[in-house]
Amino acid sequence: MSPDHQHAGAPTISEVAAAAGVGRATVARTLGNYGSVSDATRAKVLRAAERLGYQANTLARSMSTGITKTLGIVLADVANPFFSGVLRGISEAARQAGYDAIILSTDEKLELERDAIRVLLAKQVDGLVVASAAGRSDDVSHLSNAIERGMPVVLIDRLVDGLDIDSVVIDNREASRAAVSSMIQNGHRRIAFAWGPVTLSPATDLQQMHSILDEALWSDGERLRGYLDALEEAGIPFDTALVTHVLKNERQATRAVGGMLALADPPTAIFTTETEATVGALRALQTHNLRILKDVSLIGFDDSPWAAVMEPPLTMIQQPMRELGATAAQQLLARIGGDTSEPKKHVLPSTLLARSSDGPVPSHARR
Amino acid sequence: MSPDHQHAGAPTISEVAAAAGVGRATVARTLGNYGSVSDATRAKVLRAAERLGYQANTLARSMSTGITKTLGIVLADVANPFFSGVLRGISEAARQAGYDAIILSTDEKLELERDAIRVLLAKQVDGLVVASAAGRSDDVSHLSNAIERGMPVVLIDRLVDGLDIDSVVIDNREASRAAVSSMIQNGHRRIAFAWGPVTLSPATDLQQMHSILDEALWSDGERLRGYLDALEEAGIPFDTALVTHVLKNERQATRAVGGMLALADPPTAIFTTETEATVGALRALQTHNLRILKDVSLIGFDDSPWAAVMEPPLTMIQQPMRELGATAAQQLLARIGGDTSEPKKHVLPSTLLARSSDGPVPSHARR
DNA sequence: CTGTTAGCGCTTTCAT
DNA sequence: ATGAAAGCGCTAACAG
């Protein structure tokens, strides 16, 4: 019956008890630092445990206490710089509290997100941090069910419609609006936007755009809304040809932005909502032999060490990735600790790092 | 005694059994897909499970089987692009095999590595992938003990002295030698190296360098050895002033490389062993108003999407990060599956992506 | 084919 | 202060 345990040699509490000549409970009390044990026995137990190299079996403990000291993290892709930054924040905060984390990637697929949640629930994690892939009208019962069953969940990076729970985000809409606005201040009126929502039938007008937006991922929607806000503020008409609708990978960004650059009335500025989009846009510029700032201005989301050493250095919107992660972990830990206050929405500040990739419309582009 | 489980509502196998009017074992057999169950009962059980929303408690299963279907991953920093790439490879391979992963970061500190291993053993993971922070003469008993107890371990990115176990690495020395050699072909004789080993008392000659190297992290050592190999091949004397000895962060790289650039006999080329070193060097160049290629050549480890859009595009050594991770996971899974063959050393190919940051020594730098 | 039973290693009453 | 015993939810013999 006893299966071939990995740790055939791993001593159990019983062996320690035997070696120390006491009962299991006494060992548990000593090692668990609770109840009371006489100094004499405590010493004996400690010595025996030491000698045998005893290591508590966390699994068994969790089985009996219902506490795993483990957080479940669900995000799109660990290799994405934004998420890996967030992950670092989460991990650090978790470790400091004696927790560790199981990370599952969804690759932005709701299907995988459901699997992930299921696995994590089965593993009895103490709480969940999730950057959901769910759009407005998607079924999020995998999340609401978990919550109903008493699993603490905090949303990160993205709000999800219909879930009134803790969340940690930035003000995407305002960050976006401010960046685009600053370009408009500089005289730009043709501003490309990557990435817009992925769709086979691109919007043909503002109204369609809005209804597509309603179905989009929260953060994506907000960023585009911010862009639209800025245009509207300045009375600039929305041009659907300036918003990408392709799949979100570098190659597609290059293609899409390249296409815009070839337009009769090409953009004089580009706004990108993610690192891959930025790099894709940069490549398109390269291909079209266009120089940043001198020919086309550029501002994008998610600063990177590289952005500062580009020529010219890139103006970027910096998100406090580690803080986002740390805040989410702390909020979750608080819930696990029994905090039953109202759901809290943490909105962390983002920063527009003004460098030199954006400026006035070049004279040769003015019409 | 029953603690307040997160999942107060989570139905157990007994409840399903009761609801279906059969014994627990029958339920276990049905749900676990083993043994034999009549179609009639199977249907009943399935229906009951469905109705109750039964979800197996993985913890309990693990407790009884000794198998957690969980891999323990120990690496320096999840936010480092190299490791996050590797991590992605590991995660994908693991998930495909029905495993998931607990990731612990050591921040390159042996102390934290020991903690990590301890935690992971206590959690009864089925195997370990570790990028150890251990140098040549460090105590690695935390690893050897685990191995002795039958825990499968595969080393990634770094070999560790005295541990004859599975490993997945690239040929750092040769990759480094080849890159530096190509610079030498181009006429460079003063080639800066970042990062060299961190030390308070920098080497003053080649011999000291070698003994410092003997204590370094395997991969770091190999990369510097490759550099030295290339110099030796070409009969170029080693200059200790061209190897950094500072802490490994961007700021220090900038400072150190900046210092070299200010030398009476400055380097005409720079070789960097990591992204942060590369960015640091780039910053130093920026500060000193030196242009890549035209003034100073540059080649570095770890390609990035950004490297291709720099002006000029950067020549980089690309490591197959995902493959490294996937290979490690697969090797580990094989061991978990019972493979007892000889330890295997996987050496994956790296690629020197020739772009345009390296070339001949500029005439104005020739003496 | 199916039910009973005995653990897995630990925590936690409950007596003593 | 300490030991005995029950139980966490599941798996795995062993009978029937």
Image: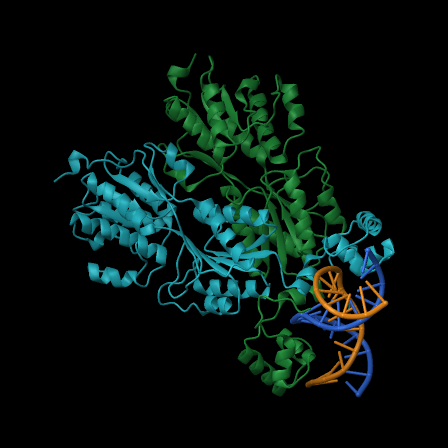
Chain colours: A green, B cyan, C blue, D orange
Q: Residue at x 19, y 35 (%)?
A: B362
Count of all numbered marks drawn on residues in the image = 0
Find residue B36 and report its image quarter: bottom right
Q: Is residue B248 visible?
A: yes
Question: Residue A328: image x %, image y %?
Answer: 61, 49
Left or right of A73 on screen, residue B81 = left
Q: Is residue A359 visible?
A: no
Q: Residue at x 16, y 47 (%)?
A: B264
Q: Nearer the viewer, residue B102 or A222?
A: B102
Q: Residue at x 61, y 87 (%)?
A: A40
Left or right of B266 on screen, residue A313 = right
Question: Residue B121: image x %, image y %?
Answer: 56, 65
The relative height of residue A293 versus residue A331 in the rendered view (above or below) is above
| Quadrant location of the N terminus of chain A in the rendered image | bottom right
Q: Residue at x 26, y 50 (%)?
A: B227
Find residue A16 and report its image quarter: bottom right
Find residue A214 and report its image quarter: top right
Question: Residue A125: image x %, image y %?
Answer: 66, 56
Question: Residue B92: image x %, image y %?
Answer: 55, 46
| Quadrant location of the C terminus of chain A in the rendered image | top left
The relative height of residue B315 versus residue B217 in the rendered view (above or below) is above
Q: Nearer the viewer, residue A293 or B83?
A: B83
